[in-house]
Amino acid sequence: MSPKAAGLAVKYGYTNIKVFSGGDPEWAKADQPFVSSAKFVKEDHILLLDLRATDKFAAGHIPRALNLPAANLDNYQAANFPDYKGTPIVFYSDNMDDIAKALELMWDYGYTKGTYFHGGVAKWQKLGNPVETGLKPAPAKLTYIRKLAPHEINIPDFVKMLTTPGVVILDARSSDEFASGKFKGAINVPSENMEKRFNEVPKDKPVYVHCATGMRAEMAYDILKAKGYTNVKLLKANVNFTGDEYKITD
Amino acid sequence: MKIRTRVAASLVTLITVSMLAGCSKTRPLVKSETPVPQAVPAEATKNDANKVRGTVNTVVGKSNTISIKISDKEMMVFKFDKETVFKNASGYKDLSAGEKVDVVFKAVGAENIATVLSKVLAELPKGTSEIKVDELKALLSKSPEDDNYLLFDTRPAGRFHQATILNSLSLPITEMEKMDKEGKVSPYMPNDKNKMLIFWCGGIT
């Protein structure tokens, strides 16, 4: 699409036109940061973290922000951040080095949606937005309640389905993984075989598809949806088996 | 800290939620490691009749699978293995969501095995040139005003708001084309025809 835009610019008579054709995937690969807009910070369902020192935070911060001074970042291990790795975490500060450090940490911990709000509180106010005062320290365990898409099922509901008669639990992992531990009564169609074996999935009962992380389940879901299935829901969560004992985490 | 971001919220009244062809909707799911140069064997594909082009959806190293979005409706999943030839990419870790790839595959039992996975390189219109990550990084160290450039994020506005490159203005290609059809030009287009204009989106289209 960017070459298309560049083509229009050529048409309008511009002479110095560049295309960064790698786009955001290339930018991410180069470990470069992404910025979120004020609109996103204001309106979206995010985890907003202010990296400045406590006194600056208390004097004025963006509403909804929690205070996690950069000096404390070292105390926050992966387990202290939300369980859901797709949590949109937005940082701001008046110190770019602190932001870079926090974003690096998010990558290391496997978070795919860490961004920052460029310009911090000063920019926020300049855009005419209100600030709040007072303390709101980040808890030792940060949480984020993910809003599910209509085709997703949450963990407690999925667990209920495991003992509900008349529903199908579909395991999209490999046959080896399935053989070494599975939900009782589950059927197994590995995601990579779904294209050819989708007929094994019933169309007339509610189907709940899972894998080990949610990723292959999503692949399987996408294929089934394309095949015209409307009775399938997806569990985007980590599922671990020890024999047939299971543990499901966000 | 110097304030450089310009927020284009006023222009962007339409939030385009539909995915643009070729522009990625999701952040890359695979973070690349330092690419290891790897010899690409000569054509190992002569006997394979199956070839598709699509956009990478997800890559799962654990099960050596990659899912490719062929169209809005169609998704295909491929296995890759030691025999798979990667072109324009050092390996599966070098393929990210949103990138366009050509897949040559063979069916083995119920599985489709990718024999060649090649990243599609950009075809740029005449009169434009490619800018690399490092050049862009260098430009961003100066403000658009100081360095006489404009950077445009041509993805849907929703993607811009969530995560964009510093100093980018939101100019969804859908808006640009709509205006073009009406004989109008975006107010972001400068008077100075020699100003450097940089366009980017969600990867190669």
Image (spheres, coloured by chain):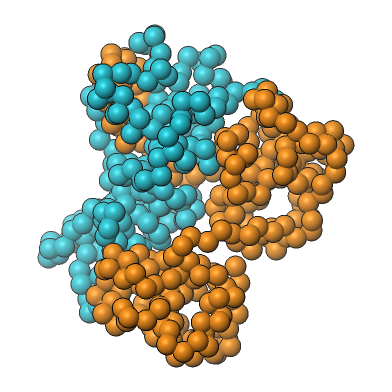
Chain colours: A orange, B cyan
Q: Quadrant of the N terminus of chain A?
A: top left
The residue drawn where x is 78% and y is 45% is A67
Residue A208's x, y, as percent?
44, 76
Residue B73 found in image quarter: bottom left
Residue A228's x, y, as percent?
27, 68
Q: Nearer the viewer, residue B119 or B82?
A: B119
The answer to whether A71 appears left or right of A107 in the picture is right
Does the rendering let one see residue B62? no
The answer to whether A194 appears left or right of A57 in the picture is left
- Vertical arrangement, residue B131 with respect to residue B73, above or below: above
The residue drawn where x is 29% and y is 38% is B122
The number of discs equals 0
Residue B179's x, y, as percent?
31, 24
Q: Quadrant of the C terminus of chain A?
A: bottom right
Residue B39's x, y, as percent?
31, 54
The residue drawn where x is 26% and y is 22% is B182
Q: Nearer the viewer, residue A112 or B128?
A: A112
The answer to whether A94 appears left or right of B113 in the picture is right
- Vertical arrangement, residue A224 with respect to residue A91, above or below: below
Residue B68 found in image quarter: bottom left
Residue A85 found in image quarter: bottom right
Does the rendering let one see residue B110? yes
